[in-house]
Amino acid sequence: MKQILLINDVVGHSHVGMAAMMPILTYLGHQTFNLPTALVSNTLDYGRFNVLETTGYMHGTIPVWRQLGFRFDAVCTGLMFSEEQAVLVADYCSQLHVEGSAIFVDPIMGDAGRLYNGISDKQVELMRRMVGVADLTFPNFTEACLLADVPYSDRGLPWDEMCRVMDKIHALGAKAVVITSATVDGKKCVVGRRNFHSDSAIRQNTAEGLYFSLAYDEIPVAFHGTGDIFSAVLIGNLMNGKTLKDSTRNAMDVVSRLIYNNRDQVDKCLGIPVEKCLDLLKNG
């Protein structure tokens, strides 16, 4: 059993973020903890929302945890709401990394070529700082373009250009990179760039080269929180000793099964009720 800390916002109305990740990580055999960056009334695409930043709480909590000697095998960061938060979390993750924690960064900013409601260009710069401390970051294609400062195209990119995007994100400091919701040479896929250095916190298969690409059939249903589900399965598998490519493939398959089995749900902004679907993780 690994101890995993989630640093992300807590959404009151919807099965997204921590609410989606914690049941999955627990099911996969890990103990989870949380440090909320904000309390959010509901997912932002409802158009109206209320946000309470918890920066002060974070400033007070981290020293207490340090004094109590709390350690984590892994940390996964999500949405940051201010430069102060990004600096605080980046510094904390750097300290934990020195102590042996694996750092995973989900650079939550946007999708389908646009920023999420309430996300500013300033937050893109803040997320580049967070990615700089990551053992692994896993943006979607929109977020990867923002991080790498390359134009977004809904047609995707050729393989060689996609590899250059991953290289640019690696140059920010991220040791390994996975990009979801990508289109490469006309095919939907998830792509990755491994880290072959001896300090890698996650298992790699060096025999298959630096890059990989995994194709999938897209289900035309858009749920909120599927990125959180992907993240939880990916991290849970990595912390159980699976390789990056195998963990990515399993996360893709789980997300596909969950979307298909809940496709008739009317309000997709609510996310997928993962607690009712944990048995779908067994086939991975």
Image (cartoon, rainbow, N blue to C red):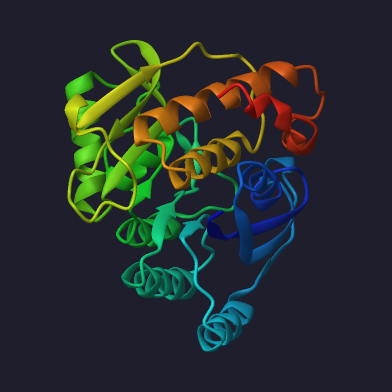
Residue at image point 39% right, 19% down: 189
- Front residue (pair 216, 254): 254
- Front residue (pair 6, 172): 6
Relative image position of residue 244 (x, y in whole percent): 36, 36
Task: Please give left or right for residue 103 compared with residue 151 in the image.
Answer: right
User: Number of marks in the image?
Assistant: 0
Which of the 4 quarters of the picture holds residue 24?
Answer: top right
Q: Is residue 184 visible?
A: yes
Classify 283 as above or below 65. above
Which residue lies most toward the front here?
Answer: 1
Classify 158 as above or below 87. above
Task: Please give left or right for residue 197 compared with residue 95 in the image.
Answer: left
Relative image position of residue 251 (x, y in whole percent): 51, 30
Classify 175 as above or below 229. below
- Front residue (pair 184, 245): 245
Q: Is residue 115 visible?
A: no
- Quadrant the N terminus occupies: bottom right
Residue at image point 37% right, 75% down: 95
Residue at image point 61% right, 46% down: 29
Residue at image point 50% right, 41% down: 110
- Front residue (pair 27, 19): 27
Relative image position of residue 203 (x, y in whole percent): 32, 42
Relative image position of residue 14 (x, y in whole percent): 77, 44
- Quadrant the C terminus occupies: top right
Which of the 4 quarters of the picture holds residue 100?
Answer: bottom left
Classify 265 as above or below 150. above
